[in-house]
Amino acid sequence: MDKQQLSHNIAQLLSRVRRSAEKSQFSNSDILVVAVSKTRPASHIRWAHESGLSHFGENYLQEALSKIDELKDLPLCWHFIGPIQSNKTISIAAHFDWVHSVDRDKIARRLSDQRSPHKSPLQVCLQVNVSGEHSKSGVTLAALPDLAKTVLALPGLTLRGLMAIPAAGSDEKQQRQDFAAMRAALSELQALAPGLDTLSMGMSADLEAAIAEGATLVRVGTALFGPRNR
Ligand SMILES: *Cc1c(COP(=O)(O)O)cnc(C)c1O
């Protein structure tokens, strides 16, 4: 990967997003692209920023912290998108702007307690286990309203919406069903909290299906930075 290749990939991705948005009946003219930079060196993030991206998503805390520090001269917005263990919340609360993977009360309460009152609130999406797989993290659709109520009441957190990672290998019809279920779940929660505005769904392989069903934020790694080794 060199800077020119990355800049080309970014242009291609943005036009993919724009074309899908134009076709979607749930038209969102400004879909936020979060570049998933896990496993990528800080130098590639710097290139991506020079080519116009400023939102980056990371899954692995230690790796992320060193890149956040290395790039602190840039005005970047950092999104934590990986599974969260309790002992990680203090660093997540200190160094990230968004967290997409809140899926239980305990994690939400810790992030709330640990977010400095001098910082703007942490922007939170609840991760939903929309495909109902046993192995995946995420709150069930049944338990979602209670978790949302908890988060809405916590200081230091602003609930923005929902995130999902549908089962790997599902076909397009199944993907569309899962993404549509997410849209329905968000619109139910909007009865409690009209300000909820974010559906974080869609990755390199399924962003067309996600945008067709109303994604407002896509998390894209491979299509920008190339294949990952892990
Ligand atoms: C790795 C990852 C992505 C990006 O996946 P690609 O297929 O590389 O686009 C998006 N979301 C989450 C939660 C991830 O872990």
Image: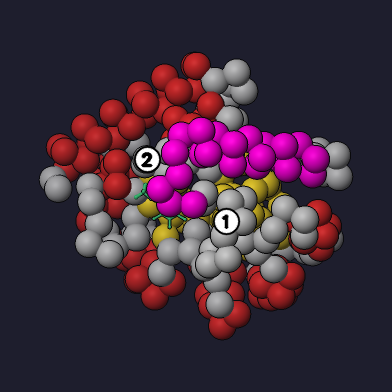
Which amino acid type is marked by label 1? His
Which amino acid type is marked by label 2? Ala
Residue 209: assigned label:
none
Residue 100: assigned label:
1
Residue in the picture at 34% in, 48% down: 221
Q: Which residues are magenta?
A: 167-189
Chief secondary structure of the magenta span? helix
* Viewer can see residue 116: no
Q: Magenta segment: does it hold 30?
A: no
Residue in the picture at 63% in, 35% down: 180
- Binning the other alpha carbons within 10 Å of mark 2 as few (below 14), some (14 to 19) or many (20 upward) gives some
Residue in the picture at 34% in, 65% down: 67
Q: Quadrant of residue 27?
A: top right
Where residue 128 appears, as percent x and y from the top left, is 63, 54
Where residue 186 appears, as percent x and y from the top left, is 72, 41
Q: Is residue 152 above or below residue 189?
A: below
Ligand 1 neighbours mark 1 (CB distance < 8 Å): yes
Where residue 224 appears, as percent x and y from the top left, is 29, 42
In the rendered view, does 211 fall on the left or right side of 37? right
Q: Magenta segment: does it hold 179?
A: yes
- Binning the other alpha carbons within 10 Å of mark 1 as few (below 14), some (14 to 19) or many (20 upward) gives many
Q: Earlier in the sequence, mark 1 or mark 2?
A: 1
The number of discs equals 2
Q: How is the image coloured?
A: secondary structure
Say which residue label 2 marks: 205
Quadrant of the drawing holding the C terminus: bottom left
Camera-near label (1 vs 2) is: 2
